[in-house]
Amino acid sequence: MHASILVPAIALVIAASAADAKPFAYVTNAASHNVSVIDTAGNIVIATVALGTPTEPRDVAITPNGAFAYVANIDTFGGKTVSVIDTDSNTVTATVPVGDRPSGVAITPDGAFAYVTNSSLVSSSVSVIETASNTVTATVTAGIGIGPNDIAITPNGAFAYVTNQISGTVSVIDISSNMVTTTVFVGGQANGVAITPDGAFAYVSHVDTSTGSGTVSVIDTASNSVATTIAIGMFPAGVAITPNGAFAYVTNSGQANVSVIDTASNTVTTTVAVGNDPRDVAITPDGAFAYVTNTTESENVSVIDIASNTVTATVAVGALPVAVAITPDLAPDPGVLLQQLHDDVTGVGPGTSLADKIRLAQAYFAANDVPATCAVLSDFLDQVRAQSGKKLTAHRAADFTSQASAIIDAIGCVE
């Protein structure tokens, strides 16, 4: 989250295909007034979305279906808006007026609402945008601290956690009522926030403004109390948690590095050097890479291999990159598709041979033996074609062929 400051008649092999398309990283460039779109497969910028010269984009969030990116903008001429980018065409399709100095954005798990923090010190609030109409349907003011900055929503969509920079607190909004129900004191300047995938904990970065030293407070969301604190680097900002919940990545904007926290022990296990002034971090849906915006001087994005915690790529983007968000992986789960096909073929066709083949494919897939999985699916397709119009009706053969082909695409097998 932003904080300001992935042989038979038909031979199958493993290769890149459209089904293997990796997610895209959307990076806001405050001084370029645009958003860079990075193809994470090749780590190249494939599009730049212009937002208009007066606009200084800050945070960005992607809808759960990957269709839209919501970008919070501070307009140098006094405007205060959220730009809605269609991720298919990478064009702005709507602009939504919100409160003063919009900073953070988060979207509910059902995609129905976007919550935007308005960080003005005199009119601190959170705007609630209905994504179907792209209009503000509620504004939360009571209970919001001074300088709301970042925001994260629990996986069950019940609560939003808002960091208040000047107050040094976290406001907890009940999404059903859009009312603040709890305020958690963390101290210092509260910056970034991210919530674990199980919803049990919120990780909040904050700064001792007198020394610049950084801390992460771990809030137990059941009791909304601070369970522990973790010392990290200087001027920490963005926070992101791996999809398996095992690690939290925190950018230290004052030290050009990223702290990696083991969430089981709540200790820093390593520190990764990146570019200058790292502000935000986002993690790919497969948990393989972390993307870090380096805001001043470097003006690029560092790509961290999470397995080794080393920077494996650096991507040049626009001027003053601030925030980053990554589209979800919407590819179907091959394991689920295999089980569905197994259920459908059981008791159908010549004996048990079709079901036996899919059962074997499931075993190979579970063992991560992709080539063997692809070979078995190829045998299956050959047998289905041979039995079409005989022991299998043409309609059923077509259905099985379609299902097996979808699995082949999902795994990445191509002719």
Image (cartoon, rainbow, N blue to C red):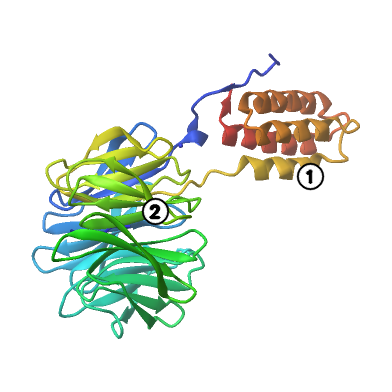
As measured in the structure, the alpha-carbon distance from the residue carrying label 1 to the one carrying label 2 is 45 Å
Which image quadrant is residue 116 in? bottom left
- The residue positioned 45% from the left and 65% from the top of the image is 201
Relative to 315, residue 254 above or below: below
Q: Which of 92/183 is in front?
A: 183
**Label 2 element class:** strand
- Quadrant in the picture for the N terminus: bottom left
Relative to 233, residue 379 above or below: above
- The residue positioned 72% from the left and 34% from the top of the image is 363
**Label 2 crowding class (10 Å Cα cut-off): few <14, some 14-19, many 20+?**
some
**Label 1 element class:** helix
Q: Nearer the viewer, mark 1 or mark 2?
A: 2
Relative to 394, residue 14 above or below: above
Residue position marked by numbered label 1 in the rendering? 343
Kindly tell me whether residue 324 is visible in this rendering: no
- The residue positioned 79% from the left and 43% from the top of the image is 344
Which image quadrant is residue 117 in? bottom left
Marks 2 and 1: in contact by CB < 8 Å?
A: no
Residue position marked by numbered label 2 in the rendering? 267
* Left/right of residue 15 with respect to residue 407 in the rendered view: left
Which image quadrant is residue 381 in? top right
Q: Mark 1: which amino acid?
A: Asp
Q: Which of 213/345 is in front?
A: 213
Counting from the top left corner in percent of width and height, residue 126 is at 29, 75
Kindly tell me whether residue 41 is visible in this rendering: yes
- The residue positioned 71% from the left and 16% from the top of the image is 8
- Quadrant in the picture for the C terminus: top right
Counting from the top left corner in percent of width and height, residue 295 is at 18, 48
Q: Mark 2: which amino acid?
A: Thr
